[in-house]
Amino acid sequence: MLKRHLLSAILFSVPFYMQAQTTLSSLPEWKNTGNKLQQDWLIHPSAEKANVFRSSDNKAIILSNGLTKRVFRLTPNVACTDYSNPVTGEQLLRAVKPEAVVTLNDVSYNVGGLYGQKEKAYIQPQWVDGFTAHDSDFVFSHFKVKELQPYINWKRNTWAYNQKQPAGKTLSFYFTSKLAALKGVTVAVHYDIYDGIPLICKSLSIENNGAVKIKINKVVNEVLAVVEEESAVVGSPAQMKKPHGLYIESNYAFNNSMRADISDQTTHWLPDPSYTSQVNYDYLTPCLLEIYPAVGPGVELGNGDAFNSIRTFELLQDSYDRERNGLARKKMYITIAPWTTQNPIFMHLVSKNDEQVRTAIDQCAATGYEALILSFGSHCNIEDTSAKNVEHWKELADYAHSKGIQIGGYSLFSSRRISDEDDVIDPKTGKPDAAAFFGHAPCLGSKWGLAYINKLKYFFANTGFNIFENDGPYPGDVCASTTHPGHMGLDDSQWKQMELQKELYHWCNERGIYINAPDWYFLDGTNKIALGYREVNFSLPREQQMILNRQNIYDGTWDKTPSMGWGFVPLTKYQGGGPEAVLEPLSDHLADYEKLMVQYYGSGVQACYRGPRLYDTDKTKALVQNTVNWYKKYRDIMNSDMVHLRRADGRDWDGMMHVNPQLKQKAFVLVYNPLKQTITRTVKLPLYYAGLTKSAVVKEKDGNPKIFQLKRDFSIDVPVTIGPESYNWLVIE
């Protein structure tokens, strides 16, 4: 059971060769009516649904939703001959490539693809009739179309901005080989296309129904000859710009950078030496996109075993504007990973005993908080599955639930030393040296690692805990051990550890367990990651912390929604610092406590309020209640898209603006004055993404409305007065 589980997170219940086929005649015929979209999809949801069509000559299949389009020639083999943006008319493809490339038993095979294109700078449709197939490739057998199914059966137990799973279609092409060595091996290439967003997800599956075991050395699940971004006569790929029309993200990312692009392990922009008419003298233009993990997978498939590749999301971009591209990427997460829009109000408790836990639960319930997380340094050990410990924490979880409060715990996986037998083995020395990402670290496929996963599941299943804070999740370490039960050796060590980590997150997500994890596992079920901050900065004076926090919020929301990132508010001493750095006693620092809460809640970002309590006096309690009530009143708009106004620099005002054309409140503006005197500034508010076109009704702190006429660039200029070292806010309808 363990082996089969490790090979694939999802096994096909019905073998490929037994699945019902879709006939070409059953597909609707494609009608080329040009661009029918007259409105911006980022403002007005597109009414055109994703679908799969047949060409009028029955030679091709078209995948389209009005915002993205891919055309696949079916004979003599499947190949993508058109990949375009219907909104801009931009053609992304310049040449035909195989659908995928798989290396099995150390031999590489193309999956699909056509041959005969001599000019690789562009494709003429009439050329395709003369293209041929190779007998040594995996050849198209049949295809299937079905409704898009959820990748994860998400169970929601908290407030969420988006509560719906995505809708769309899945197109699957099935391929077999004529080679005797690959008898019984079927490869399927899957395309998911989504309603209302220029996005396609591509993945690949392999099933072995042959008598011979196969080893999967490498899987390239996407190969695209993309139109180059620029012409440079000389220069290396690193010096040249990558094509901007496609944003690529796969669910194989790690390294704790808190950013998708740096965490990515699969996107490779390569030269294409077969493109001999390119401008670059040495044929080094980075215009060939290949998607594959740099390591592995290295897994073996016996008879009846199946393998599923990574999932690669391809989002079309229609602009060079940073704000617009960021909004598009955030829309992608909202659509395909709706659990990232969950955003419970939580406290980070540092506890020494049960009395402190009960007090914190009571304070959460009294102030409108929704969850309590037992932070690192607390007396909760979720790795202890003894009957006594489990029963102990079940009683406290039951108490929290009786008060309407969810409860969670913390566990550190990596960055710890277990034993020579269980730690990551350095492939160079063959020893558990400090060669892991965090120095010494356990292998998730070791005996200890497998037991660790089982302990976590047991604890959550038997205590009713609702939140899992997984610090140091698997960071991509390879392991040369040949005795760890969770992997065979070095080749499959990264792949199988990734599968283990992702399966744990799937398990949690499908049981309504909310996950904080400081690595990019969003596409496999995690809910929140850090905004990005330097922890020692929280030992600085509060005045500095507040400016740095606002910089972190500003910088951390270009590509993440507010709900995807957490901030930090140390109520007690953290990473050093004196009394000027902390808020305790809370009643002595009410003004700073309020400003810290407002800047986070007003940005839609939940902070880790880390300490033993939320309030110490009735006055403090009232402050927390009022701030939380303010946030809940505007929760929908505060969790909506973020538009960046001015970054904090301590010299003048700074601010952010939420926008949502679907709500009554079209925009919410939060501005700060770091100076020691009152200021009045005319603030330009760009309201294009708020969906407003002619006029805007502006209320200052729910005051009397004022009407402003929008300028031709969809902006208004609003005079705003902000008190010294204070904030102000506006609601726009």
Image (spheres, rainbow, N blue to C red):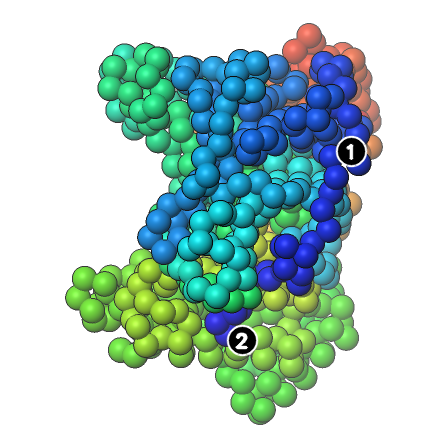
Mark 2: secondary structure: loop
The picture places residue 275, in percent across and down from the top left corner, at 36, 20
Residue 475 in sight in this render? no
Residue 1: give its label: 2
Question: Which amino acid type is shown beneath numbered disc 2?
Answer: Met
User: Residue at 69% of width from left, 54% of height from top?
Assistant: 19
Percent position of residue 408, x then y: 60, 69
Mark 2 or 1: the one toward you: 1
Q: Where residue 631 is drawn, which disc sits there?
A: none
- Identity of the residue furthest to the bottom in this view: 388
Q: Quadrant of residue 712?
A: top right
Furthest residue in direction left, as rendered: 429
| Cα separation between marks 2 and 1 | 41 Å
Amino acid type, label 1: Ser
Looking at the image, residue 440 lies above or below residue 112: below
* Position of the C terminus by quadrant: top right
The residue at 42%/36% (across/down) is 290
The residue closer to the viewer here, 325 or 133, is 133
Q: Depth check: 188 or 416 in front?
A: 188
| Residue under pointer 1 | 25
**Mark closer to the chain start, 2 or 1:** 2
Is disc 2 surrounded by few (<14), some (14 to 19) or many (20+) residues within 10 Å? few
Residue visible at 60% across and 85% down? 390
Relative to 689, say whether 550 is above or below.
below
Q: Quadrant of the N terminus?
A: bottom right
